[in-house]
Amino acid sequence: MKKKQILILGGIFVLLLLVILIFENPFRMSEYQKKIEAATVLFPNFKKEEVTKVEIIATGQTSTLVKQDGTWVVASMDNYPADSESIDELFTKVAEFDNANLVSDNPKNQSEFQVDITGIETKLFGANDKVLAHLFVGKNTPGFLSSYVRVADSNNVYTAQGYLQGVFDKSTRTWKDRTIFNFNKGIVTQINITSADETVELRLDTENKWQMLQPMSAAVNQNEVDNLLNTFSQLKTDDFAEEKELTDYGLDAPSSSITAILNDGTTATLHVGKEEGGKLYVKREDKEPVFMLFKSNVDNLIKKSDKLTENVTPPETEDSNPLQPQEENPAE
């Protein structure tokens, strides 16, 4: 009897499996997968290493990026060093654009998707100003996970993954390199912090432990110093300052400063000036540009001695120990 039941159940299982294979074929490629497989990139001959110049037109402003001696600069901003990571991200996106998701081929719809002059026009040039790619980046899709794109000489509008407006248009953040300092924190041997209240001097001892020498000799909270160095060694600006005189920034006589001395004798010094709109003007000692940092970021650098010292719990005395039996007063 049991054998017969097993055979019946087995037959039902096989029948259900056949139904699934016929109607829900898991091995059959979905329409979306077919589209992905059949998709071709929009710029098949594009190679990012061949790009020598980029022009981006957005909201009536043109940003020009030029490769000079292997280094990218913002030519439209006095050849200031450019943010190479952001440029590489832009190139990667252009190389990935494909025709998998066509949403329109009607030129009348271009303004709706903002892939006309209302969008972000981008031209990438190679040697002898040869155009390697020319495209328009439009608005986000309703789900905000993709954006509309169009090749300049085509009416076809496609969707591409990502928030592309932030990749192609830096707006007020600009394409400038936002790096203030970039050094190896592991080779710092001394830190000097000067403020209106005190001068703090920290130095590595023979056991690679930080010790405070000024304004007093004290043990140092190693994690606090490590966090400070993490910030200082990879410092990026929150904003670029408008061109003024040093006196207008308060940097002719800085209110505070921090210096890291490296094991090769070189130094990295940041001077801090006036505060304006919640940001403070700051400047490297060895370079001209003036940057702006939020006050909270400056506070992470210009630390006071009481924030850096190790908190050591004082030993308990007999009088402070609540468990210590108290001597009875002698009878008078």
Image: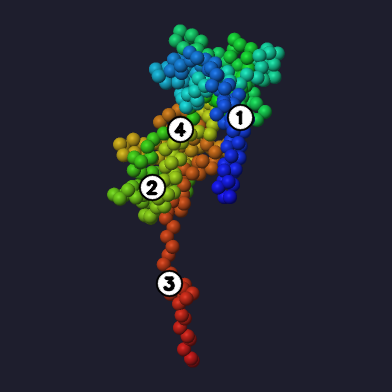
Q: Is residue 132 above or below residue 318?
A: above
Of tags 2 and 1, which is closer to the observer?
A: 1
Question: Mark 4 belongs to which amino acid?
Answer: Ile
Q: Is residue 142 above or below residue 270?
A: above
What residue would you read off at disc 3?
Answer: 317
Q: Position of residue 5 (x, y in %)?
A: 59, 47
Q: Residues within 10 Å of mark 1 (few under 14, many from 20)?
A: few
Say which of marks 1 and 4 sits in front.
1
Name which residue type carries label 3: Thr
Of circles 1 and 3, the one toward us is: 1
Image coords of residue 295 (percent x, y): 54, 41
> What is the CA distance from the residue labelled 1 to the residue labelled 3?
83 Å
Q: Amino acid at mark 2?
A: Glu
SS class, disc 1: helix
Q: Earlier in the sequence, mark 2 or mark 1?
A: 1
**Relative to residue 226, is residue 291 depicted above or below?**
above
